[in-house]
Image: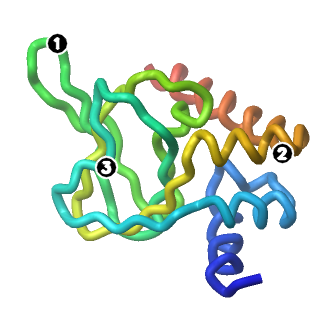
């Protein structure tokens, strides 16, 4: 196993979405993630555009900014290390619900929908664990409204 894959596995163990996965599951997913760097002010995802995957913040911070119907913008969330966003894009090709903009220099791990689906199609146990965590997260978001 390459050192980079080992580091990615160790990092993924601390990400809530993947915390319940075993080492084999993490190793399979770790090989699919791609590291991406962003400068302050870079737009990582854009509200209203299609998404092709999710992002996990390795270092740095980003703001989720939602543009309202009147054109005003509001920060709805701030992401730091081990936080993730864009997870809905793993399941469908719907439009992004907010823009995510780097607040500072940051590094993310990106996973595309097609890479994610290729892996979960091979391992139903992994799919169930991830879907359970997504459902828990959606309930929390609804309760916060």
Provide residue 129's location: percent of width, then percent of height: 81, 41
The circle drawn on residue 126 is 2
Q: Decide: is 36 above or below 141.
A: below
Residue 22 in the image: x percent, y percent?
A: 86, 60
The Cα atoms of the two marked residues, 1 and 3, are separated by 22 Å
Are the residues tagged 2 and 1 within 8 Å (C-beta)?
Answer: no
Specify which label sits upstream in the sequence, 3 or 2.
3
- Mark 3 packing: few (<14 Cα in 10 Å), some, or many (20+)? some
**Going by the image, does 83 lie left or right of 25?**
left
Residue in view at x 24 percent, y 49 percent: 43
Residue located 70% across and 39% down the image = 117
Q: Nearer the viewer, mark 1 or mark 3?
A: 3
Mark 3: secondary structure: strand
Q: Is residue 60 left or right of residue 30?
A: left
Question: Whole-percent x and y of residue 102?
Answer: 26, 56
Q: CA distance from mark 3 to mark 2?
A: 27 Å
Query: What is the number of the mark on residue 69?
Result: 1
- Numbered mark located on residue 10 in the image: none
Instruction: State the image coordinates of residue 48 (x, y, percent, origin top left).
Output: 29, 24
Q: Which residue is mark 3?
A: 44
In the rendered structure, which disc, 2 or 1, sits on the residue that comes first in sequence? 1
Question: Can you name the residue that lies furthest to the top here?
Answer: 69
Secondary element under disc 2, as helix, strand or loop, is helix
């Amino acid at each position: 196993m390459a050192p980079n894959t080992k580091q990615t596995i160790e990092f993924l163990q601390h990400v809530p979405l993947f915390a319940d996965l075993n080492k084999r599951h993490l190793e399979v997913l770790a090989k699919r993630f791609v590291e991406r760097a962003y400068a302050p002010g870079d737009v990582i995802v854009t509200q209203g555009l299609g998404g092709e995957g999710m992002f996990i913040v390795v270092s740095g911070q980003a703001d989720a900014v939602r543009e309202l119907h009147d054109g005003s913008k509001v920060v709805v969330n701030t992401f730091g290390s081990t936080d993730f966003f864009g997870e809905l894009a793993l399941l469908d090709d719907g439009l992004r619900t907010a823009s995510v903009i780097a607040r500072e220099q940051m590094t993310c791990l990106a996973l595309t929908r097609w890479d994610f689906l290729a892996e979960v199609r091979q391992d139903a146990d992994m799919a169930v664990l991830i879907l359970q965590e997504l459902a828990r997260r959606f309930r929390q978001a609804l309760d916060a409204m």
